[in-house]
Image (cartoon, grey):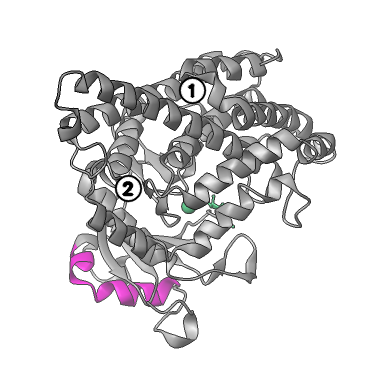
Amino acid sequence: MDETVATQTRYRAMSDTPLRQYLAGLPEVRALLGGGPEAWTVREVGDGNLNLVFIVSGPAGGVAVKQALPYVRLVGESWPLPLTRAFFEHEALSEQARWVPDLVPRVLHFDADLALIVMSYLTPHVILRKGLIHGTRYPRMAEDMARFLAETLFRTSDLHCPAAEKKARMALFCGNTALCRITEDLVFTDPYREAPLNRWTRPQLDGDAAALRADGDLRAAAQRLKLKFLTSAEALVHGDLHTGSVMATDADTRVIDPEFAFYGPMGFDVGAFLANLLLAFLAQSGHEERRGERDDHRAWLLDQVEAVWTGFEARFRELWLRVGGGDAFDPGLFADEGGSAALAAAQDAYMAGLLADSLGFAGCKMIRRILGLAHVEDMESIADPDRRAACERQALALGRLLVVRGGELGSIRAARQAAERIAEGRTP
Ligand code: SR1
Ligand code: MG
């Protein structure tokens, strides 16, 4: 597909009237909305960093329309970005729907030229990040996210996917270089140097930012993780699995927005999600009107950190033993006496490595949200800069610990306890 934008394709950024006309020409969508285009309402609701998002409602139902812009929305036209990210998002959504159709939005239509995807409208879902800020608990979320992670990562890895098929898929997703480059720069590099787009709560965190930039152990550990991100094509990862990429209700969880998808390290997805739960946890004191009023919610958030990892690990191990199917760890090699013990030991070592990766990546993802370009609403919505900085300083401390020593912690319980100690102002 042509990577250039706008001038060489039918591409035009959508607005109200052209979108109505376009959707009216799609029989399935038109039927789902009901009535004619004049009876529909169109709202542009995108509040993310990159794209346009429209909610179109008609007498019979609604759809969500996501369209890539040829530049980074957060920054403007000075930062061009290929429209092909919509192609990769559609490919990733299709792959995820093979394994967890109940955990992703249903795709109704994809137009590569317009870089536009029409999806089922998720209602009454809210963006998980917003719900967590508000103090809402989601009883299904941890179990659903554990299943999403285990299924999508296991099924697209060499533990399940035959090598030739996996290589073909890797080749396809190798084209998503521009989106990977954003992560390489914004997550793994810029927070550790004086980059023009960096920002933080000033002047409160000036000293903290300088200390992290001067921290050689931290820089080296972050670069080890960056190398893993660049080279470890373990599975098709979502690539941007923060709590703004999840929509939830009490009874339903959907993962959206996989435009950063590529074949990368599994721990990058697991770590991204854990990092955002930990950021939500550390932001809670900034949202309290009375000290301690959110203690229960804080404890619940840490329970979710543990539940996501333990649920993920259990299902991943189970898939490995029960389903297998890939070219790695051929069961025939473990069929003899002693084979099952050897396989169990190999699985233990594999899962320990995956936890270490996940915690390290989680640390990188926390630090980038405090010192880099793109921040999170959990912290940004704390109006008092002193209170915000206090929460953010704790996030930097936990982030540093996870990047430098995540591999030594050895259990998700130890990571939880480190978070608790930092939140209480104790030494981790
Ligand atoms: C320039 S894009 C900034 C961030 O937004 C996306 O959600 C990704 O997290 C990216 O790093
Ligand atoms: Mg996104």
Q: Amino acid at mark 1?
A: Leu
Is 251 left, or right, of 240 in this rendering?
left
Q: How many marks?
A: 2
Q: Position of residue 90 (x, y in %)?
A: 33, 61
Per the image, the residue denoted by label 2 is 122
Q: Residue 29, relative to residue 277: is it above or below?
A: below
- Neighbours of disc 1 within 10 Å: few (<14), some (14-19), many (20+): many
Is 307 left, or right, of 217 in this rendering?
left
Which residue occupies 40% across, 76% down? 17
Question: Which is more N-terminal, label 1 or label 2?
Answer: 2
Q: Amino acid at mark 2?
A: Leu
Q: Is residue 287 visible?
A: yes
Q: Position of residue 15 (x, y in %)?
A: 45, 72
Q: Position of residue 78 (x, y in %)?
A: 66, 71
Q: Residue 258 got which mark?
A: none
5 or 294, nearer to the observer? 5
Q: Nearer the viewer, mark 2 or mark 1?
A: 1
Per the image, the residue denoted by label 1 is 301
Give the structural element (helix, strand or loop) at label 1.
helix
315 or 135, nearer to the observer? 315
Give the structural element (helix, strand or loop) at label 2.
loop
167 or 313, nearer to the observer? 167
Magenta range is 15-31
Q: CA distance from mark 2 to mark 1?
A: 24 Å
Can you say which quadrant of the picture contains the C terminus? top right
Which residue occupies 63% across, 67% down? 76
Q: Is residue 56 visible?
A: no
Can you say which quadrant of the picture contains the N terminus? bottom left
Q: Main secondary structure of the magenta part?
A: helix
Q: Position of residue 24 (x, y in %)?
A: 26, 74
Q: Residue 56, relative to residue 391: is it above or below?
A: below
